[in-house]
Amino acid sequence: MKIYTKTGDQGITSLYGGSRVPKHHIRINSYGTVDELNAWLGLLRDQPIDLNSKDMLLVIQDKLFTIGAILATEPEKELLKNGKERLKIPLIVERDIELLEREMDMMDEQLQPMTHFIMPGGHPIVSYCHIARTVCRRAERMTTLLYEQEPFNDKVLAYMNRLSDYLFVLSRKLSSDVKAEEIKWIPKNMDE
């Protein structure tokens, strides 16, 4: 099987289920941004970080593939005319969200309380995590726009929201692990 099909040369692509849409369609932007996030998480996972974080990132990457499949499928294409499931796409469920929450709680227990916003950076590993967090927020914005137009499993929205929180807490944990200074954002007066 060749990787190139030439079917997208005119700016049109296929959704999961066969429909053809422009490559700038909100559905394509949504799952494309989730794919971008997945790539950043792969880069983060490739860094010298603790095994639990690597394992969690792999679990999250798997869930992002599931989310990508959900977003790439038009709701009316999920079922056959007889009401049976056409495409065997896994679901995002409450326990997926709860796993992120438990991991955040465990990391938070080991961190100093946060009193200010924190400037991204301090170490390349931490910066990769912050980039992933901001891409996650963009993916969340895209998916909420798609959801307004064509609703899907709302657990996807909750997962994306919780994932960006998880990535923020992970960035703080990684900062602690590599002994990077967390620089607090303290607004300065323009008159100073």
Image: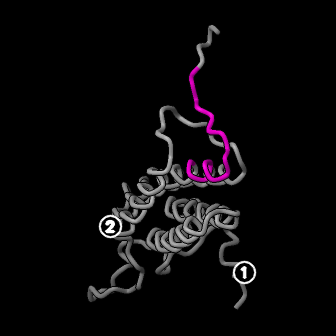
Q: Where is residue 128? Give x, y as percent.
A: 66, 54
Closer to us: 178 or 170: 178
Q: Where is residue 133? Give x, y as percent.
A: 56, 52
Q: Which amino acid, mark 1?
A: Tyr
Q: Which residues are magenta?
A: 172-187
Secondary-structure class at tag 1 = loop
Secondary-structure class at tag 2 = helix
Rounded to the nearest whole Å, what is the CA distance between mark 1 and mark 2?
A: 37 Å
Q: Which quadrant of the structure image shows residue 153?
A: bottom left
Horizontal side, residue 71 vs residue 150: left or right: right
Q: Is residue 91 visible to the viewer in this orientation of the structure?
A: yes
Tell which residue pokes out farthest to the top in this image. 191
- The quarter in which the N terminus is drawn is bottom right
In terms of sequence position, does the residue under pointer 1 or pointer 2 come before the other?
A: 1
Q: Nearer the viewer, mark 1 or mark 2?
A: 2
Closer to us: 144 or 125: 125
Residue 94 tag number: 2
Closer to us: 9 or 129: 129
Q: Where is residue 143? Give x, y as percent.
A: 45, 57
Horizontal side, residue 11 vs residue 31: left or right: right
Identify the residue under disc 1: 4
Tell which residue pokes out farthest to the left in this image. 83
Decide: is 139 above or below 121.
below
**Residue occupying the point 57% across, 37% down:** 118
Q: Which quadrant of the structure image shows residue 119?
A: top right
Q: Which amino acid, mark 2?
A: Glu
Q: Where is residue 64? Give x, y as percent.
A: 51, 69
The 10 Å Cα crowd at callout 2, few under 14, some 14 to 19, many 20 or more, is few
**Residue occupying the point 68% across, 54% down:** 125
